[in-house]
Amino acid sequence: MLEKLLGGGKLEKKAITKIQEYLKTLCAATECLKETLLQESFEKTYCIENLEREADSLKREIIGIIYEGAFLPYIRPNLCNFIEIIEKAFDHMKVCAFEYRYILNSDLYGLTYKNIEEECLRIAHINVEMCQILIKSFKALWTKDNIREKNLAIRILEKKVDEIKLELTEKIRNCNLCKITNYWEGKIMSDFVDSLVSVSDVIEDASDYLYLLDLSLR
């Protein structure tokens, strides 16, 4: 597989290194979000935006290298699509961090968020775990390692996130103390939960895309 994609070119090797850096930045962002929720830190939410800017710079470098001539022509759009899928995870984490800042400084923190904090932390932890597996999947694309097993592991973890979201939703609906008093408070909580959960959806999509790319190159 490696021979089909590379041909020993410097541009290809440079692009692969940059994509790995991009994925590591994604993992750093999921870890940052998890630590933000653990520490209940207003200041730490801004690390998501810093990492998103770093990732955006890497994305531009990667696409520039690819269209400079790295990889065979039919592979280039696939790798660019892979990067663009992952970019959505940064967008979701930015929304999550933004809404969390408001939650920390409002009545939503004590009345609503603290009742679902455990579930949110579990989701954030799974997002980190899924991202770490995605890095291994990308490395496996360039070796003889098995991507299918990693793809399956990510799918299993994403299903766990879906189950936790159901628990979390029911908890809010049935909580007598969770007093959301207006539309905007409800929207803030909804956007926060949806963005946190959507990170795992994006990672699963990226994993599926890698798996299909692997199958097409056999």
Image (cartoon, rainbow, N blue to C red):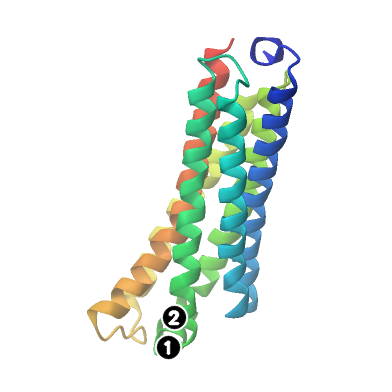
Q: Sort mark 1 into few (<14), some (14-19) or many (20+) by Cα contacts within 10 Å.
A: few
Rendering quarter of residue 172? bottom left
Q: Position of residue 146 (x, y in %)?
A: 67, 23
Secondary structure of the residue carrying numbered label 1: loop
Residue 40 in view here:
no
The amino acid type found where label 1 is placed reads Ser
Q: Residue at x 53, y 15 (%)?
A: 73
Instruction: Give the left or right position of residue 180, taking residue 47 as reference.
Output: left
Q: Residue at x 46, y 84 (%)?
A: 109
Assess disc 2: are there few (<14), some (14-19) or many (≥20) residues with their C-alpha within 10 Å of its C-alpha. Answer: some
Could you tell me the amino acid type at mark 2? Tyr
Find the residue positioned furthest to the front.
68
Give the number of the disc on residue 106. 1
Quadrant holding the C terminus = top right
Q: Position of residue 2 (x, y in %)?
A: 70, 15
Q: Is residue 19 above or below residue 162?
A: above
The answer to whether marks 2 and 1 mark residues whose Cβ atoms lie closer than 8 Å is yes
- The alpha-carbon separation of the residues under discs 2 and 1 comes to 6 Å
In the depicted structure, whether residue 149 falls above or below residue 113:
above
What is the quadrant of residue 167 in the picture? bottom left
Q: Secondary structure at mark 2?
A: helix
Indicate the position of residue 206 as horizontal and vertical percent values. 51, 37
Q: Which residue is mark 2?
A: 102
Q: Quadrant of residue 70?
A: top right
